[in-house]
Image (cartoon, rainbow, N blue to C red):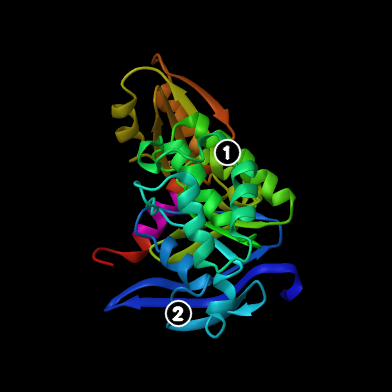
Amino acid sequence: MSDGYAIDVSGLNKHFGDKHVVKDVSLRVRRGEILGFLGPNGSGKTTTIRMMCGLLKPDSGSGTCLGFDIRRDSGQIKRRVGYMTQKFSYWDDLTIRENLDFVARMYDMPDRSGAVGRTLTGLGLTDRANQLTGTLSGGWKQRLALAACLLHDPELLLLDEPTAGVDPGARRDFWEELQRLSAAGISVLVSTHYMDEAERCHKLAYLSEGRLLAQGTSQEVIATQGLITWAIHGGNLSNLSETLQRLPGVEQTVLFGAMLHVSGRDGELLERTLRATASGTGFRMEKVDTGLEDVFIYKMKQSAKESGPGA
């Protein structure tokens, strides 16, 4: 593996017709690292994942996955990668064990029974092994999908929004399993919309409009934007948000339930504006740490402005 990187790609581009969906993406994922892949729907995350594991050829760009060329060695990559798609893709009329046995056949594994048994035990599925998949809850289907990814002992997991629609308890259990796999040396690239999941990743990459806008640890991503953030509490926050957006120093307002986050780069100007606006009102304001969600909303809006209408 090149310099300890499970994924090392540079300048990836992909068009579908006249639509440029991935634009010059370069990315590295180290062995044993969990990289969170974030971005709005339609940002090009799934297309990028498929190019990185050899399922889709880029129009331009190059790179390696587990030391194999993503253009020439897709067959070698597929045997060493576990790929979990957004949509659950196993058979409802088969049991958990039968689904895993089918996957083992696809990989032409010599000891299918042993591999299935070990995977059932490792993922806590033994007691449900003979249950029809169609009767499983979302969390148990998710666990089956992960088991199918792990059946052939992959070196890298590519997980495309694996926890969408899954209850909080199942999400927590799933991430504990990912942490365990990472500690065992398995690299993980996982796309997610959940900020609490993003915080659990070693590194993050944010994609919007097909462009990679930020990457690094969560602290690094937050620091590079240089945003100062205040939280405001009180009534009619929606009206306040509209008012503030037109005032100097305010670059972003975001409602979080009963709290309004107001951010800008010029800290002194932002504070003067907020204190003048809140003076004599019932609003309470406090300076807070800028969060990942503040940063990613900001990056998304900036990207939309740069792309322009109809981009």
From the viewer's side, name the closer residue of 86 and 203: 86
Instruction: Name which residue type carries label 1.
Output: Thr
Quadrant in the picture for the N terminus: bottom right
Counting from the top left corner in percent of width and height, residue 140 is at 47, 38
Q: Is residue 77 above or below residue 113?
A: below
Residue 247 on the magenta span: no
Dot 1 falls on a residue whose secondary structure is helix
Give the number of the mark in front: 1 or 2: 1
From the viewer's side, name the closer residue of 84 and 108: 108
The quadrant holding residue 246 is: top left
Near mark 2 (Cα within 10 A), the count class, few <14, some 14-19 or many ≥20, is many
Instruction: Name which residue type carries label 2.
Output: Pro
Query: Which labelled disc corresponds to residue 279?
Result: none
Is 104 left or right of 21, judged from the image as shown?
right
Counting from the top left corner in percent of width and height, residue 274 is at 45, 30
Label 1 belongs to which residue? 126
Counting from the top left corner in percent of width and height, residue 176 is at 63, 38
From the viewer's side, name the closer residue of 130 and 62: 130
Cα gap from disc 1 to disc 2, whole angstroms: 40 Å
Label 2 belongs to which residue? 58
Tell me which secondary structure the magenta stretch mostly adopts.
helix
Q: Residue furthest left?
A: 310
Query: Is residue 290 shown to the viewer in this render?
Result: no
Q: Is residue 308 above or below residue 58?
A: above
> Who's the residue at 34% across and 32% down the image?
241
Quadrant in the picture for the C terminus: bottom left
The quadrant holding residue 277 is: top left
Q: Who comes first in sequence, dot 1 or dot 2?
A: 2
Q: Which residues are magenta?
A: 298-304
